[in-house]
Image (cartoon, helix red, strand yellow):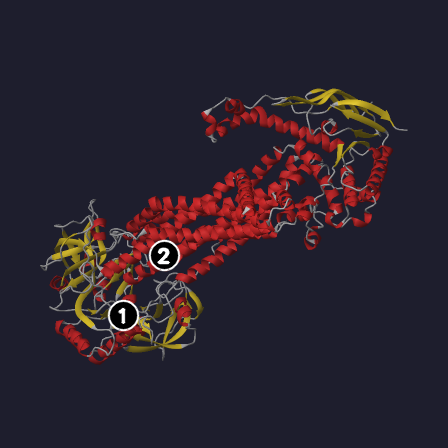
Amino acid sequence: MALVDIKSLERHYVMPSGTVKALDGVDLEIKEGERIILLGPSGSGKSTLLNCLSALDTPTGGSYEFAGKEVPRASALGPKLWEKISSIQWNPLTLIPPLRFLFYPIDYFTHSRPESKASEQMTRFRRDNIGYVFQFFNLLQDLTVLENILLIQELADGRDEERALHLLKIVGLEAEVNRFPAEISGGQQQRVAIARSLAKSPRLLLGDELTGNLDSKTSTMVMEVLVKACEAERITCVLVTHDESLIEFATRVIRIDSGKIISDEIVE
Amino acid sequence: MRLLNEAGFLFGLLTKRLARSLWRTKIRLFAVVIMVMVGVFAGISFAAYAHTASSMYDDIYADTDNGVNLADIWVENPGSTWNGSAADSICDEIEAQWPDSDLSLNECEPRLKLDGVMFHISDDGQESIIPAVWHGIDQGHVDRVWFPDHECCSGAMPSAIDEIVVDVRVAEGMDVGIGDSITIGAGFGSMNYSVVGIGFHPNHLYYAQSGSLFPADPGTFATGYLTAGGLEKLANLSVGSANLLLIDIVGTPEYDLQSTTDIEGEETIFVIDEIDSILQDIQDSPSLVYSRSGVESVEFLRADAESAMEIYVPVTAMIAIVAGITIFLSLQRLVQSQAREIAILRTLGIPRNVIIPGYILMPIIIGLVGCLLGGIFGILFGAPSMLGIYEGVLGIPIIESADINPILLQISGIAMLIVLFSGILPAIQASRLQPLEIMRGQHQIRLSSRMLQRLTSRLPSTVGLTIRSSIRKPARLAFTFFAVGLSMLIFGSMSLMMGTMEEAIVGNVEDNQNWDAEVTVPFGGEVAVSEWAEERGANYELKLAFPANPVGDSRYLTVNGLDTISTNDNSMIVLDLKEGSLPVANSEIIQVLVDEGLQHFLDWQVGQTQTIMFGANPMNIEITGITQGEISRTIYVHRQDLAPVVGIEATSVLIELPSGAEVDSELGEISLGVTQKVDLISTFETILDQQQAIFSSVLALGIIIAIVVLFNTLIMNLAERDVEIATLRVLGAPINKIGGMMLGEHIAIGLIGGILATGFTIIGTQALVSTFIQWAFYLTVSPDSMVIAQLVGIVVFISVMLTPFGMWRISRLDLVEKVKDLSQ
């Protein structure tokens, strides 16, 4: 069974200038243990695909199953009552801001509450299944290297200091556990971010331009660490990048353009 | 020229950009404008009161046809009366031996002034005996009765011996009008008098019983102004009797103020000393000679106007500083959030001096709008309301209000200056931003505190982060706490002061005074009152209260001679001994207790021997202990030690009435006044009720300002945390756990802020109290646990209240957009 099974996935944005099809009928299966590099020009839809994979974004069409289960998504809700009222052209009511509060109870039960519930289900999905590495590391500056990892564990299931130290050893930072992020290099910070993303044993690790802020030597080192860590933890990876040189670390390369997959190759 | 034009164009663009950025935080912007407005509003209100009151007293006391020609020196015979020839001969002697001074004698006028009672039957038929002061006015050139051109007053001075002018507060409080007949007494039965006028007396402008700091409740105190003959008849005294000499000096000389340690009016002091010597030579009974500072009403109103004058600038400044800090923090945050834009502009070659003016112009605009609104509201509502409250509480009509224009300029000037300062530092910070550092993102990297990390390393990371985040920006937090402290000071000082005063007055009367009525008696009248008490099975005790002053010091204190000096809860007056021991009667040197105010002002300590003067008669005293809780300066001594020195046995009788027994007209006719404990408490409670609206407004004001300041900082903290929180949310952190961390952070900030604000309030209130305590009014601020709990609780509550807002904000975070930011 595929870990990820996407069929005819669509993500359309309705803009005043027309509909933008960021994803336009994507079909994709990802097996456990694969390391996928997602390549494509700017605006091709690769980040949107990553956001849909992580349940940060809700597709507007198609299906997305993760380990055989439908991934939660925010249901399509129409405009709020207040939005309907205030959108009527030249409406003097909209000049009285406190009026909005009168509609709040209705809008809360018809929109805010369902949105919030769906949002938490999507967060739970991420917590249970997804690891995420950002381009700019985004470590918490007030916490040490070790504490950055422990924090994620505490916010998820529970603190496991042994595992946190083990992950830091995998990424080669066992000597830096008590340093603050500002005291270590960019490459080291990205390695901490990788360890952090693995802290709660995700099944799928997503990276958005995770070497984009690093020089080539450091990029290579970070990718080696990532591959090592993912292999050690048996984690599937999907990494978005512009950098063709990262293909050497992948088991599969997918190219995307205008919201469609244009090539899908297995790397030997 | 081209360069100037370009700079002007860029300045315009930058200012527009800044204004738009500020407009995005319009709620905060409005809050700051409102703070400036409130500062100006409060300043104008207080200033109008202070200036109006000051000039009004000067006009009333003036030696003019419209003024009352307030005496400059009073000579009082507290132990007896001079007969007609004696009073005139003392005046002649003073005139003849007038000291060689720059001050010239204008007039010496004998006057009879007696304590007494007014018998009043209310509409429901209830008879009450009201303590009163009656003035017998013969010539009436000095200390005239004031009949202002106002609807409150009418009629003329009495010309027949059965005519009387009553005070406006008597007319209003007891529904007495011209033509009515009233029944009054002065220890020798009662008589009816016909009311021929309603006016004010300069010695009773501030309408309170002797020794009381608070205006009398309507119907609990009366004063009336009779002919000299009328009062002599009432008190069964011979023609020309007097116990007061009013000395009027040409012009209005300076006199020594009780509120300062400096010596003002040296010439007046010299004349007083000389008159004292003259009296010592010509008569035996101790007489008191004092200037205007010795007349309670005059001194109280002067001190009130003076403190209002002193307070309005700090109040305005305090609120403006809070607004200034809020503006400063908001602009600083703006500089931070616009750092990249500023860096780009600097990289493109825009000079520093083009960046600076915008950041200064914004506070100026905020200040101007605040001043304009504050000015309008202050002039239209604040000042009239304040003067209305003044008229309501003191009962004195405002004939002419102070000129508002200089006040408006002064207050707006103070507010604008403070607000302007708040923009200078952010402007300099903005101009000094290093483009290269910002482009590299180095300006945001700040090493966390290693010490704090060590201290919190054993805690869960969520708790560690909560604590470290709370104090991530110590300077901002310090400024916030300072501003919260200032705003809570406005509320807290009022609560602490009221708590202290309530304890000092109501608490003291309720808990430490076990008598039900204090009956003032004429000389020798204690026997009749004692018999009255015995007949009704009441407990009673004699009290001898006599004014004195420390040797070489013109300030007066009261020496209370008591039969029982005790700290026992059952005694008639329960003393609160702060240190030392109780005095022993019949000691070689008379042993006394002194109040802590005397310890404070004169540095009198236990074990010392001091000398006090009863007029010209000295008395040595040995201090065995210090008491606390007295607002006025007081010495306690055994009555048997005091009586031989002043030649009087008692001035009043303290009576503890058995159940069923009541004060009656029989007691009224043999007394010079009956003060009932319930009236004293009711007077203060009425004052509290009257002021409740003001206290509530001030309280609400302080809390609202604290909310704005705290919200401003916490919202900025939250906004700065967006990236962190988005990261955690993307990594799967549930909103309730982030909410828990936020709650913990807000509780921590609230607790730290609350404790600091409370400390600030206590220190601030003590400093505030120390500025207006004076000889006649002394109290110490004791931190009340309820008030402290309230202050801390309010700050914690405000802080915690932001958690739902923070949660709402998180729930609205667009994670897709944030991830774009995080990855680009």
- In the image, taking residue B698 as reference, residue B90 lies left or right, namely left
Of residues B635 and B372, the one drawn nearer to the viewer in this rendering: B372
C-alpha gap between disc 2 and disc 1: 25 Å
- In the image, taking residue B812 as reference, residue A195 lies left or right, namely right
Of residues B268 and B22, the one drawn nearer to the viewer in this rendering: B22
Q: What amino acid type is highlighted by mark number 1?
A: Tyr
Q: Is residue B778 above or below residue A121?
A: below
Measuring from the top left, give residue B41's x and y in whole percent. 39, 47
Image quadrant where one finds the C terminus of chain A:
top right
User: Is tag 2's residue or tag 1's residue first in the polypeptide sequence?
Assistant: 1
How many C-alpha atoms fall within 10 Å of the one at disc 1: few (<14), some, or many (≥20)? Answer: many
Would you identify the image quadrant in which residue B124 lies? top left
Measuring from the top left, give residue B73's x and y in whole percent. 24, 69
- For mark 1, give the secondary structure: strand
Q: Nearer the viewer, mark 2 or mark 1?
A: 2
The residue under the point 62% across, 42% down is B341
Would you identify the image quadrant in which residue B717 lies? top right
Residue with the mark numbered 1: B290
Residue A68 showing in the rendered view = no
Q: Are labels 2 and 1 on one chain?
A: yes
Q: Which mark identifies residue B802?
A: none
Chain assignment, label 1: B
Q: Which mark identifies residue B308?
A: 2
Q: Is residue A182 above or below residue B238?
A: above
